[in-house]
């Protein structure tokens, strides 16, 4: 029986991180987010080294001995197998985001279907997605495993925790591997519900005011915005409000609203 991962919040050694990667790889495979040798996962260890999955192996069938350790520049330090060419994408997150300690890359079918259709998951449909991720933008296509992919990702990485990759798949990050995996689940869940809503009729988006309330509620759910802040809010259904009720917020105004909500929440405790 494969052991369950060590929960976030516990100090972990390299062996425990390796176990977590193997479990997360198995979960991605079992959920159909990856097939064959697709996808890759990584964790930033306490000393800055990177523990990652190898190339040309099914990520749902890994053992800790299969994993590879590199330095922060991607130079291999340990492991008998070859590191993935897509590690550069992971390293970009680690260089750019001090808050990120884990990255997941997969090809969840419905989410990747949206990516292949050139569509972001950027509509304000689901409160949980808005609170947890803001929105899920689409990064323009670049050949996997090349510097061009990192270049395409650069404008998005400071601002978002989950991204669709055009004609490719999805990538998520988090303070720990479990969070990064849950964000990958959220991409696929959001894509399925969005598709179902479109098949059922015309999806009804939330209004700008409703989105602002959800964003202001993030601290209550212990959700932190990326250091760069969300570059854009989800697309809203402004037609659901009368003209005098419509709200347009700049980033500074949104941050002020969130700060005010945090102060009020603290004063009630």
Image: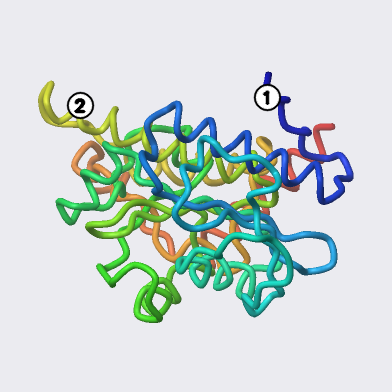
Q: In the displayed image of the protein, which residue is found farthest to the top?
A: 1
| Residue shown at the point (10%, 25%) measured from the top left | 201
Residue 226's disc is none
Please state which of residues 23 and 94 is positioned toward the viewer in this rendering: 23
Dot 1 and dot 2 residues touching (CB under 8 Å) = no
Position in image of residue 40 (x %, y %): 50, 52
Image quarter for residue 179?
top right
**At which x and y percent is residue 168?**
28, 56
Quadrant where the C terminus is found in the figure = top right
* Total numbered labels: 2
Q: Nearer the viewer, mark 1 or mark 2?
A: 1
Residue 203 % position (x, y) = 19, 31
Residue sitting at the far front: 80
Front-most of residues 56 and 72: 56
Q: Which mark is residue 197?
A: 2
Colour mode? rainbow
Residue 251: tell me if it is visible.
Answer: no
What secondary structure is marked by label 1? loop
Picture coordinates of residue 136, whole percent (x, y): 38, 51
Q: Residues within 10 Å of mark 1 (few under 14, many from 20)?
A: few
As rendered, which of 222 and 106 lies closer to the eye? 106
Location of residue 195 with respect to 82 vertically, above or below: above
Query: Which numbered dot is residue 2?
Result: 1
Relative side of 143 to 55, left or right: left
Which quadrant of the rendered structure holds the N terminus? top right
Name the image quarter holding residue 56.
bottom left
Q: Residue at point 41% right, 38% down?
A: 210
Tell me if residue 105 comes above or below residue 152 in the rendering: above
Gap in angstroms between the C-alphas marked 1 and 2: 37 Å
Left or right, 132 with respect to 269, comes to left
Q: Secondary structure at mark 2?
A: helix
């Amino acid at each position: 029986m494969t052991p369950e991962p060590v929960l976030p919040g516990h100090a972990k050694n390299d062996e425990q991180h390796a176990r977590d990667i193997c479990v997360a790889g198995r979960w991605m495979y079992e959920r159909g987010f990856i097939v064959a040798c697709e996808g890759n996962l990584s964790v930033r260890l306490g000393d800055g080294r990177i523990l990652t999955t190898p190339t040309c192996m099914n990520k749902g069938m890994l053992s800790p001995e299969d994993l590879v350790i590199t330095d922060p520049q991607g130079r291999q330090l340990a492991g008998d197998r070859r590191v993935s060419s897509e590690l550069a994408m992971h390293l970009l997150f680690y260089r750019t985001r001090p808050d990120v300690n884990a990255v997941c890359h997969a090809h969840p079918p419905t989410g990747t279907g949206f990516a292949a259709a050139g569509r972001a998951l950027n509509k304000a449909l689901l409160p949980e997605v808005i609170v947890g991720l803001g929105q899920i933008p689409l990064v323009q296509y670049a050949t996997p495993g090349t510097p061009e992919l990192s270049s395409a990702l650069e404008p998005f990485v400071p601002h978002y925790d989950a991204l669709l990759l055009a004609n490719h798949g999805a990538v998520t990050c988090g303070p720990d591997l479990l969070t990064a995996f849950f964000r990958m689940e959220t991409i696929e869940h959001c894509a399925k519900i969005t598709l179902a809503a479109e098949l059922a009729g015309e999806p009804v988006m939330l209004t700008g005011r409703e989105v602002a309330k959800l964003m202001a509620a993030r601290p209550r759910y212990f959700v932190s915005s990326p250091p760069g802040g969300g570059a854009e809010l989800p697309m809203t259904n402004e037609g659901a409000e009368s003209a005098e009720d419509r709200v347009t917020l700049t980033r500074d105004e949104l941050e002020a609203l969130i700060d005010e909500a945090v102060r009020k929440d603290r004063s009630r405790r």
